[in-house]
Every structure is written in structure tokens, then in C-alpha cells.
Amino acid sequence: MRKLGITLVTLGALVAPSVATAAGNLHKSNMGEWSEASWSNREATAADFAASMMQTIKHRQFTLPEFQLFSLELSQCMDDIADDHSNYHRPANEVAVGCFLSLRPGWMD
């Protein structure tokens, strides 16, 4: 299987993709803005978040299919959270980290 290699920058618990990987533009948005954005923009930003978070896990390498699956699951988790209007004020990057921890808790071991 082909291994995924991505160069990214992480800022503490928050994620910030490098210019080379940024395809979406919702990295600094809140969930209200997320919910109003196009599907393609949400998917691209979720992929940026996924790549950044996966890059911080040094003890394993990920295949392209693993990355693609996690990226889609992350986007869906974020969409589900955005469905609740009481979450509109929450920063998208913080929601992405919360989704990551709930979707893949074993990856941090």
C-alpha cells in the first residue's frame, strides 16, 4: 500500500495546515460559518485538519485509504456538531480536535 507523506504545521492542540496543503478555507471559522459553507469547502478543510492531526502521530504511518476514510468521518462528525445551532460559536479547529479524539482515541496511544 502507498504511504501518505504530508508536511504540516501544528500549533498546540489546534491544527493549522501549511500553505502547501490548504485546500479549504474554513480553518479559522466557527461552526456557524462551517454549516453555511459548500460541501467541497467543508470536505477540503476536513482533509487539511485530518492530515495535520495524523502527521502528529509519530509512532505509525498511514495509508492513503486510511487518510481518505478518516477525512470523510471527520467531516461528517463536524457536520453533525454544526447541525446543533448552539454550537455555532465554537471554533472549527477545536471541534476538529474533539472529533479526532472521539473517532480515533487509540491513535494517541
Image: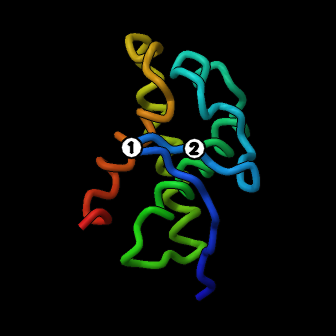
Which residue is located at x 60 percent, y 58 percent?
A: 8
- The image's colouring method is rainbow
Task: Residue 40 in the image: state x and y as whole percent.
Answer: 73, 40
| Residue 43 left/right relative to 40 | left
Residue 16's disc number: 2
Classify the position of the N terminus by image quarter.
Answer: bottom right
Q: In this view, which residue lies farthest toward the bottom?
A: 1
Badge 2 amino acid: Ala
Badge 1 amino acid: Ala
Residue 76 to residue 86: above or below: below
Residue 61 to residue 71: above or below: below
Picture mark count:
2
Q: Residues within 10 Å of mark 1 (few under 14, many from 20)?
A: few
Task: Residue 85 in the image: state x and y as whole percent.
Answer: 44, 12
Classify the position of the C terminus by image quarter.
Answer: bottom left
Task: Residue 2 in the image: state x and y as whole percent.
Answer: 63, 85
Which residue is located at x 51 percent, y 70 percent?
A: 66
**Towards the viewer: 55 or 47:** 55
Q: Residues within 10 Å of mark 2 (few under 14, many from 20)?
A: many
Q: Quadrant of residue 107?
A: bottom left
Residue 108's disc number: none
| Residue 43 left/right relative to 95 | right
Q: Quadrant of residue 41?
A: top right
Residue 101 to residue 7: above or below: above
Tag 2 secondary structure: strand
**Residue position for label 1:** 13
Tag 1 secondary structure: loop
